[in-house]
Structures are given as structure tokens and as C-alpha cells.
Amino acid sequence: MKYLDYTFAYSLFLIGILQILSTEIWHPPGAVLDTPILWIFISMFNLLRLRNGYNVVGLKVFCIGANLAGLAIEVVRFKMFGPQALIQGIPIVGALIFSMLQK
């Protein structure tokens, strides 16, 4: 299960980097960098949680909060852009589930 958790965290990081690169290279209309940067921050929180466990005070709350904020943005993006938002939504939901599980 830990490998699946790492997969979700690294996939969010990779999606964020690729989205930033595609925005800078192709300049699609209406594309901004705030959402990919949020995905990178979410993945960094989740990787910090995976590295340190829950020994860091408040890390579980920050991870759950970051994952919920990312999920809320993906719900709005799904309404605006359609199924493309599922690509980022699935790893966020997985990371949220793993963040809430107590180890």
C-alpha cells in the first residue's frame, strides 16, 4: 500500500511539472500556473508525510487540508473543463484516502 501512496504523490508532482511546462511552451488560452503549483505543493506535503510518518506535529492535518483543497479545485475544474480534470483528481483522492488512514 505504501508504494501506491508513493505513486499518487509522485504522479501529482509529475503532472504539476508537465502542466507547467506545457503552459510555458504552448501558451493555451486561459491556462494559468496556480493549479499546477498547487499540485506540486500537495505532492510535497504527501511526500513529507511519507518520509516522516505522523511524527511531525500537525502534518496529518496539513496533508488532509491540502488534499481537500486540491480536490475542491478539481471538482470546479471538472465542471469547467470536463473529464480532463479526472487525470489530476484521481491521485488527489488517493492521496486524501491514504492521508486519513492512521498508520
Image (cartoon, rainbow, N blue to C red):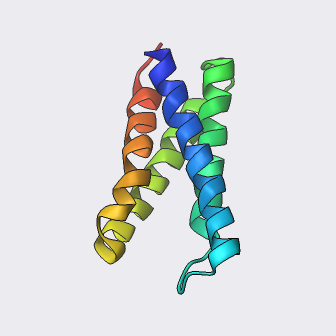
**Picture residue at 49% right of the left edge, 35% below the top:** 8
Is residue 87 or residue 76 the one in the foreground?
87
Q: Quadrant of residue 71?
A: bottom left
Is residue 77 or residue 20 the one in the foreground?
20
Image side of residue 79 versus residue 73, left or right: left
**Picture residue at 46% right of the left edge, 35% below the top:** 95
Is residue 21 or residue 98 the one in the foreground?
21
**Picture residue at 38% right of the left edge, 61% below the top:** 85
Q: Is residue 58 visible?
A: no
Q: Is residue 35 visible?
A: yes
The residue lying furthest to the top in this view is 103
Q: Is residue 36 above or below residue 44?
A: below
Q: Is residue 41 above or below residue 64?
A: below
The residue lying furthest to the bottom in this view is 29
Residue 33: % across, % down: 64, 70
Q: How many marks?
A: 0
